Amino acid sequence: MEKDSEVQIEATGPGGKASNSLTVDDPDAGLSLEEKKLKVKLKKDLHMTNGQWNAGLAIFFVSYSVFEPASNALLKKLRPSLYIPSLMILWGIVTVCQGFVSNFAGLAATRWFLGLFEAGLFPAIADSFGGLLAYCISKLQGVGGKSGWAWIFILEGIATVIIGIISFWMVQDFPDEATFLTAEERFRMYHRLKQDQQASAGLETFKWTYFWANLRNWKMYTSSMFSMGMGAGLYAFSLFLPSILAELGWKATTSQLLSIPPYAVAAVLTVAVGFLADRTKRRGIYTMIVSPLAVIGFAILASDCSARATYAATFLAAMGIYPCLPNGIAWVANNTEGVYKRGVTIGLMMGWSNLQGVVVSNAYRDADKPRFIPGYAVLLWYLGFCLFGGTVLHYIFLRRENALRKAGKRDYLVEGKNDYEIRLMGDESKPRNARTARIVKAREPQQIESRKKVLLLHGSKCPQPVASVLKTVHTLTKPDSVLLNKKNSDIYPFEDPASLEFLAHKNECGVVVFGTHSKKRPNNITVLRTYDGKLLDMMELLLTLPPDQPEKEQKLQIGVEMKPMILFSGSQWDDSSSSEQAALYRTVKSLMLDLFQGEEISSVDVAGLQYLLMIAASETSTGSTDLNDPSNKPVLHLRWYRIKTVRSNNAKIPRVELDQIGPSFDFRVGRLREADPGVMKEAMKHGRRPNEARTKKNIETDLVGDKIGRVHLGKQDLSTLQTRKMKGLKRSRDLDVEDMNGTGSQDDDVSQDEDMVDGGMEIDEDFSDGRSSMGGSGDEISIGEDEDEAMGNSEQNEKPKRQRLS
């Protein structure tokens, strides 16, 4: 083992040149003056050689790069609120353990595990003040019998563990679940992500298909190419900046402070580039603009110039490297749809980028002193060819792909595929021409949704009463329903509805009926609705079995496309007050309508109305309105009837009889999760359907199907108004007085048909065709099918007029 000598440091003022034994030409040039002393002390305490020191540095990058793609996939699998704080605690513990190592083997093991646990994240601004923090902590040299380098690992590791524990309550999983946002802000954030093609989070499960698809995608290789330049430049700058500042001749503390301005300028430029890229929706062009600054900066650093010019070059180097990193990651993420595919792509890209730290840390050899021309040549090749050239190549290939899609040469990728298959394709299915856009747009959530199917499934336990409910609902909703007979275990809708959201999205269903059975909640039916792939609201129905429940299952035999009527029996369904009880009934009514109403139709054949679904609700026995008490929840009674019409004495209205058919279900309302007001408002938005016929002005259809038109006439001359003389009618003055006072007899000598012809309008004798001499604005005329029964025949006017149904 070679002998390590003590480091002698002599710093002059800001105008002079530093005369110290370790300069930028030393093999340890990647460390500041204080860090060099700590390194010498660490090597001496652990009895390490220079080769072992370099190996200890490099082993971190190996595990960090290899496990980064897997870490990104686990981030989605285990949820960010659990995974990220756990990683912080683990690498904090490993960092503390580094302070207690006593040989090279212990250091190598802790460095390996540190790279493993830090693979989930990479630092943002830690480099700007990390050296200053380490300098302050190193003043604890000798405290508790520990060296300064040991206290750096111990204290920074303890701080990381504490922050990691706090992060369990600070980290949010997804924007639409963030507790610090309001319902409207969460909904707005989700739709902004959807516009950026980043809204598939929470709807996918990991498949190896995403990994192999990335290996076949050219974007994986071009993005890895320019990420090599980003990684090499980033690690070279962070490693060599302290030594470059030491050349200015400042003290160690001043050198650490002088390292902050380049990072600050780079941070401002990074924010500006991100802002401009978002506004212009162009990211690659800005990387091509700023990356040459890094080439110029490192070229100046490689030249033999003054220390002040070298310090100025650090600003150019920082401005050319740091804006490229977040901008490049966002560029790749925007062009990669599918949360797992995006995670694997960015993981492979950043893993390959971080692996360049091994190359950079070994590029500056002792044999290349004092200019290190080969080391700077390697770095300039990274920046010029990989960073700048890779960005240009990625930009050209993207423009070529967009041109092919605009020309329709990628339409075959989405034709004949359903929504689930298109979503699995991710960014490969993004349309660029009108025809492909229509294909994909038809499968996206619409502002006015068409009838979506009902998904019916059950848990691990499904007793006969629950199965009867599912089969009955499936019979009534055919063909717009999907019944899954496979058992689905570990699904708890009110605890985690993600599984049901995924199944509903996969099967293109807007309503889900989930049946399960447990000791706490026997015969449980959960009905939920989704909007835009996410849970809208949900209600729990607890099936109560009557004492006379038949052992044999009763089936409901209703033909397909036979649309039953729905009757909500009881006044509580029409309660429009703001009470909790009224709101509960409105929610139940809305859910039942979405479940059973089926496709909207414009007209109904009266002869086809053969079945009736009656939904009634019994009041609570206690009479209390406290819904927190389960005994105060209403009980729903669902009954199915067959409608029979029997001849009656009334020629207009037949007598209707109801024969009960099928099973009878009684449900007690259980737990309820109401929709957010902002999301419900968006879901209930009604606009004009594309195929909806335009209504004609002043023409409407009444309840029986007759068209009624309103004709607006000009101002009429009322001086020519003539009234009909009532022949044969003699009334006394006393009777007229009684009629005016409202106390007279209700039975006049004149029949209704004689006095009220054509709806009460009196006909002038001079107008034999039935037209009124008074044509005020707003008179209604009939333009329906009964126009052949128009007024004009005095003999027909004397008979009671019968309205004909169409």
Image: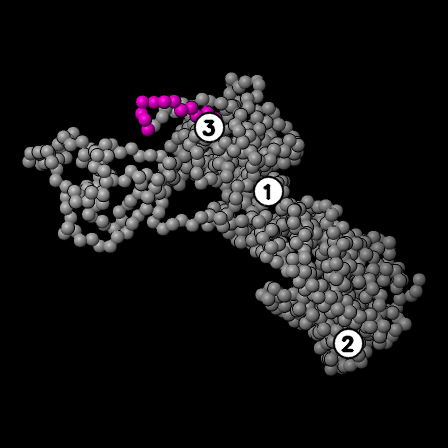
Give the residue at x 61% y 25%: 463
Q: Which residue is mark 1?
A: 508
The residue segment tinted magenta is: 636-652
Asked if disc 1 and disc 3 are in contact, CB closer than 8 Å, the reply is no
Q: Which residue is mark 2?
A: 299
The relative height of residue 281 versus residue 551 in the rendered view (above or below) is: below
The colour scheme is: one colour
Q: Quadrant of the C terminus?
A: top left
- Measured in 3D between alpha carbons, the distance from the residue under mark 2 to the one under mark 3, in whole angstroms, is 85 Å
Q: Quadrant of the N terminus?
A: bottom right
Question: Would residue 382 be visible to someone looking at this image?
Answer: yes
- Kindly identify which numbered label has been placed on residue 611: 3
Q: Is residue 806 left or right of residue 63?
A: left
Q: Nearer the viewer, residue 680 or 413?
A: 413
Element at badge 3? strand
Query: Type of residue at label 1?
Result: Glu
